């Protein structure tokens, strides 16, 4: 009997860890979120020149909002674009957009748009009528000129708006 009592606590701890790790692999479901997406309307690079700045290259950004739920639509309710200083420059949605299951909605920031700066960002809000898979929201930045190609991706992160 003493032997059974001796192993009871370690066995319970092992059972707890196994149960917790099994649930950790389950996808998160939500009825909505607000997300922060970094955007670069230009990149600084190279050495600092006489005027005090390095070279600056403008890039375009294709924002892709992908509904990853197989059964439920989501609604994008807001896509606010901010500059490096935190000033809102533009609301990209005049009305909420429904994205069907496995569908994608895209926003585009032109290469010539330089007001956002190297610290521009989107704050994107979405909602759903029922708990759904979280969408994947990314921005593909690109500058393609002749034989020179620059591309990279940034990914959105959930943020709290109640603090």
Image: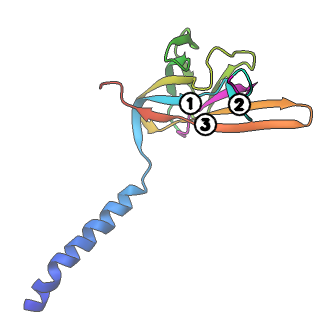
Point out the tag, 2 or 3, that comes first from the N-terminus: 2
Name, please, the residue furthest toward the top: 94
Q: Which residue is mark 3?
A: 154
Name, please, the residue furthest toward the right: 146
Q: Nearer the viewer, mark 1 or mark 2?
A: 2
Q: Is residue 116 above or below residue 16?
A: above
Q: Is residue 45 left or right of residue 87?
A: right
Discs 3, 1 touching: Cβ within 8 Å: yes
Q: Which residue is mark 2?
A: 48
Label 2 packing within 10 angstroms: few (<14), some (14-19), many (20+): few
Q: How many angstroms separate mark 2 from mark 3 (CA)?
A: 25 Å
Q: Is residue 149 above or below residue 4?
A: above
- The colour scheme of the drawn protein is rainbow
Image coordinates for residue 134, horizontal then vertical, percent? 48, 38
Q: How many angstroms separate mark 3 from mark 1 (CA)?
A: 6 Å
Point out the tag, 3 or 1, that comes first from the N-terminus: 1
């Amino acid at each position: 009997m003493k032997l059974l009592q001796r192993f009871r606590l370690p066995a319970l701890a092992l059972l707890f860890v196994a149960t917790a790790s099994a649930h950790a692999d389950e996808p998160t479901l939500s009825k909505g979120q607000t997300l922060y997406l970094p955007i670069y309307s230009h990149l600084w690079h190279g050495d600092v020149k006489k005027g005090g700045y390095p070279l600056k290259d403008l890039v375009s950004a294709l924002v892709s909002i992908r509904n990853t739920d197989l059964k439920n639509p989501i609604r994008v309710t807001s896509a606010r674009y901010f500059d490096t200083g935190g000033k809102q420059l533009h609301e990209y949605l005049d009305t909420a957009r429904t994205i069907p299951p496995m569908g994608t909605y895209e926003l585009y920031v032109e290469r010539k748009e330089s007001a956002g700066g190297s610290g521009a960002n989107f704050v994107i809000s979405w909602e759903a009528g029922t708990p759904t898979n979280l969408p994947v929201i990314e921005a593909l930045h690109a500058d393609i000129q002749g034989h020179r190609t620059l591309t990279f991706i940034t990914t959105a992160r959930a943020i709290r708006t109640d603090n």
